[in-house]
Amino acid sequence: MSSKKPFEPNFKTPPEAFCKEEINKLNSNGLRDNLHQEFRNDQPDISWEAEQLAKSHGIYLEFNRAKKDPKNKEWIYMIRVTVPGGGPINREQWRTFDELSKKYTADPQGHTSLRFTTRQNIQFHWIKKAAVLDVIKSLAEKGMNSLNGCGDNTRNVMGCPLSCFSDIFNANEWAHRVGDYFQLPLDPFIEIFEIDPNYVRRPGESFQYGPNILNRKFKISFSSVYRDPKTGKIIPDNCVEVLTNDIAIVPIVKKDKVTHFQIYIGGGQGERNEKASMATLAKPFAIVTEVQLLPTLDAIVHIHQEWGDRQNRVWARLKYLVKKMGIEWYRDQVTARLGFPLGKPNHDHDYGDRHLHLGWHEQPSNGLLTYGAFIENGRITDASPNGKLQSMVRDLMEKYPIQLMITPNQDILFTNIPSNSKTAFEADMKNYGYGLRNGKIYSNLRLHSGACVGRDTCRLTYTDSEKFEPVLIDQLEKMGWGDLRESIGITGCERQCFRPATKTIGLVGSGLNRYQLKLFGDETARYQGTPLTSTDGEKIYLRSIPREHVATVIDALFKFYKQSSKNGESLGAFNRRMGPDKIIQYLKDIPATASLVEKIFGTECVIE
């Protein structure tokens, strides 16, 4: 099939073909350029060149999307703090987060907040330029920094937060170790933000970034395993949705011990409209020992740094190199660099279902308790129908001898809770309104669903996601679907930060107040969802659903599932069994959705 722009990446790009972003990095003096000056002048924004470099320091330049005057933008900043494995964050650190938020993050309505992300980061929104230095310096003094928060480098390394108490495998510890190894050089960060070096811990060994660092963002994640407290059985735990990453690391357990790791490469959910691009899960690559793991990760990233496309940013992610050159080619390149053979992967290895870790858990390592608290879309604020969450978190952290961790579903784990404090802890949360939305207990559908930040504070998005998701779930609950243990994921654009296509139903912003439907994913996060495309591959349906009709479409899909499912299958399994043509025909046959599937889109940009 033809494409408007064929898939023709320029791998191992010669310098004369570098795009402007690559040239800017080369000319930046190690990501310094004039950032020191630009964050201290009187201009509310920063230059394009500085903006590109600031991303690697965890800073995004944004503007108030609700303000309609394009010639007089209200410039704001998002600061993203790296938190490998989601934590732990201690009392003093959280106090700093909370105080900085109260001081600097007021939105146009005067509400302050913090935002957890699906990569276990913490984000500050609505920051004005004059506050950027104080936020970054204050956090650095408490052992937290924003380096690697964004930009063309390895991003926050993910790992199951609950695993730090495991008696089998600590994915959180590995996330910290790998995060330290792939951290960008500290000296530019220290110089730009005038941070006292005594506050900054330097890793013992580090990845050698090139002069223009990586080709694009690079994501690494560890899944985990845990022992079922009732049966003693070892269960794989994929709370991180590991295969959506450039590199996925899955532990292999033999006789109650992790003896090896299976590595997968080439995952990624981001796409680009009108470009030949793809969302895909990582492919099995190799099996390595614990000693071999870090050198192998180093080699994988080095090969991408050397070979990845530096002319076409849309094809600069690892998944396109893997797609074009193949797994065997990549394994040969890595093996040659390492000097030792890699074990062949097991394509049937079970990496587990997605777990949310909500509610109470006993910590195997010390007998204390963890409580997993649902935070709708990761927004910690007192201005919420879900309760005074910012005050709740602050006061719990002050009252109890606990720590905080962030889950890949944007929720909180309160850890190290004394067992004799369980009743009091629950009562304290209830006093802040936790557990209810507008007076109603959280439904299964709400607990399993979520969204990215969306339009207000992300200049990449087309439409709302974080604001739309709670309202959509409200509608579906009123239609009687709250008890469904299924997931709905929403993002404001095709970059798909909430990973909607791995959920049962994905909604991807395709325009202002419009969403594309993605199906065939699953609550388990084991499947890659796709647009609703006819079997012949010629037509895409429901690529631009008006916001006011989204609930109607989902209601129809739920009804089809209830009418025709069998053997207790999940909605995702049902959709895969039915296939796109039967689903399309069903939606055509019922009055509620017939007119919505009349508009058909061609599949013009695909990768063969």
Image (spheres, grey):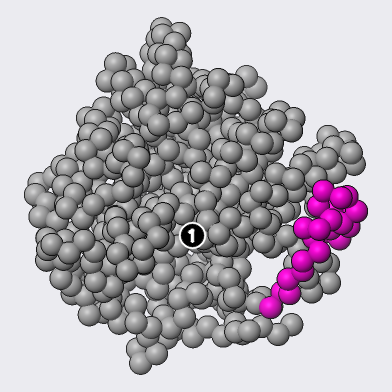
Under mark 1, the amino acid is Thr
Q: Secondary structure at mark 1?
A: loop
Q: Is residue 476 left or right of residue 434?
A: right
Q: Position of residue 282 (x, y in %)?
A: 58, 60
Identify which residue is drawn at 15% across, 71% down.
Answer: 34
Residue at (56, 45) in percent of width and height: 468
- Which secondary structure dominates the residues rendered in magenta? helix
Taking the view exactly as shown, the residue that stands out farthest to the bottom is 16
343 within the magenta span: no
Residue 231, quarter of picture:
top right
| Vertical position of residue 166 compared to residue 367: above or below | below
Left or right: where 515 falls relative to 296: right
In which quadrant will I find the C terminus? bottom right
Q: Nearer the viewer, residue 82 or 54?
A: 54
Query: Can residue 266 be seen from the camera position used here?
Result: yes
Can you identify the residue that label 1 sits on? Answer: 461
- 55 versus 134 height, above or below: below
Looking at the picture, tell me which residue is in the foreground, 326 or 476.
476
Instruction: Give the residue displayed 18% in from the left and 72% down from the top.
Output: 33
**Residue visible at 35% across and 92% down in the picture:** 16
Q: Where are the magenta residues, as a range?
A: 577-604
Q: In the rendered view, tell whether residue 522 sits above or below residue 300.
A: above
Camera sees residue 525: no
Q: Nearer the viewer, residue 201 or 556?
A: 556
